[in-house]
Amino acid sequence: MKAILNQLFEHRELSRDQARDVLHRIAASDFNNSQVAAFMTVYLMRSVSVEELSGFRDALLDLCLPFDLEGQESVDLCGTGGDGKDTFNISTLSSFVVAGANYKVSKHGNYGVSSICGSSNVLESLGYKFTNDVDRLKKQLDEANICFLHAPLFHPAMKSVGPVRRELGVKTFFNMLGPLVNPAKPVYQLSGVFDLKLARIYPYLLRDCRKQFKVLHSLDGYDEISLTSAFKVIDQSGERLMEPEDLNLQRRAQEEIKGGKTIEESAAIFQTVLDGRGSAAQNEVVMANAATAISCFDDEMSFEDAIGKARVSLESGAAKKCLEKILSLT
């Protein structure tokens, strides 16, 4: 690790193979926590390169437990986190809305590291039992249109990194990797990222995975469509700058999409929205992100049609039924 750290401290980037190798060695506990923390800290002070991020992704996919969907098409709605905005669980709620619209969702998620409540926190608090049993997950996907892949169960090699990440308590390059290392390798991907530079790196990585994708970044720093500002949508056809008004949705204040101060408060917001009792701001933010994920399945679908499907899923209770079904199956 000393040679790698010296290379990085001299402002020299790692090659893809070097990045892959060092993450394999971190997973094998070849380095102590201080060395791992120093390595992670480098990427808090400078941007990660495409080659480095590709190598890190390769290593995590090498080491993960595979989950073969056997040709079944699904989408993952997964943000990097790390935007520091403390919103309610928008991407997880949007996932259930997509499932309620009769699209398959293989959701990858984890406990919050730099936020109070990640997707795993909120689902666990609602009674969901994590599993890496492929047959059980396929049953959930078949019957509830959604399954949840709790990252630590599929990336056991990264167990040694967890304590260091929690002690640092800030976003690291592992946040950047979350949407790239779903073991199910879904065909479709909606990835929200916290940084515009990273948003422009992501398409190179997703094309490399041969995915149909959309990358989202709100210009005021959210890793999703927040409706609080203009936002970027990047896909195979290029990059677009859009405003909430372009979606026929109202611009919202940041206070309107704040999350809970505890996991319990966050879970209560989650249930309130699925129960159809969410505020207009909460509902519209969820529908905007769900509609963007739905549009990944069909490039010809208008946003108006996609948001119509999302609205019906949420307001009819179909999204809530998907949650109830997946909980019953655990």
Image (tube, grey):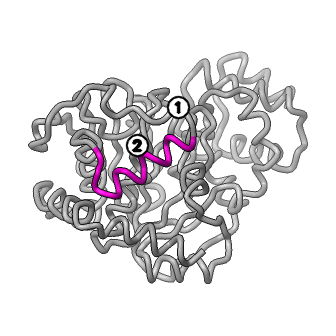
At label 1, which amino acid type do we have?
A: Lys
Q: Residues within 10 Å of mark 2 (few under 14, many from 20)?
A: many
Element assignment for label 2: strand
Placement of 179 over or under 173, stated as above or below:
below
Residue 245 % position (x, y): 10, 36
- Quarter of image, res 87: top left
Question: Where does residue 193 sit, x and y in percent of width and height?
Answer: 43, 38
Front-most of 322 and 19? Answer: 322
Question: Which numbered disc, 1 or 2, marks the residue closer to the eye?
Answer: 1
The amino acid on which the numbered mark 2 sits, given as a three-letter code, is Gly
Question: Is residue 277 one of those drawn in magenta?
Answer: yes
| Count of marks placed on residues | 2
* Horizontal side, residue 182 vs residue 300: left or right: right
Q: Left or right: 74 with respect to 330? A: left
Quadrant of the rendered structure where residue 212 is? bottom left
User: Residue at the location (20% across, 39% down)?
Assistant: 240
Please state the extent of the stretch shown in magenta in the rendering: 263-278
Name the residue carrying label 1.
261
The residue located at (77%, 41%) in the rendering is: 161
Q: Disc 1 to disc 2, how far (Cα)?
A: 22 Å
Asked whether the viewer can see residue 203, the reply is: no
* Magenta stretch secondary structure, dominant: helix
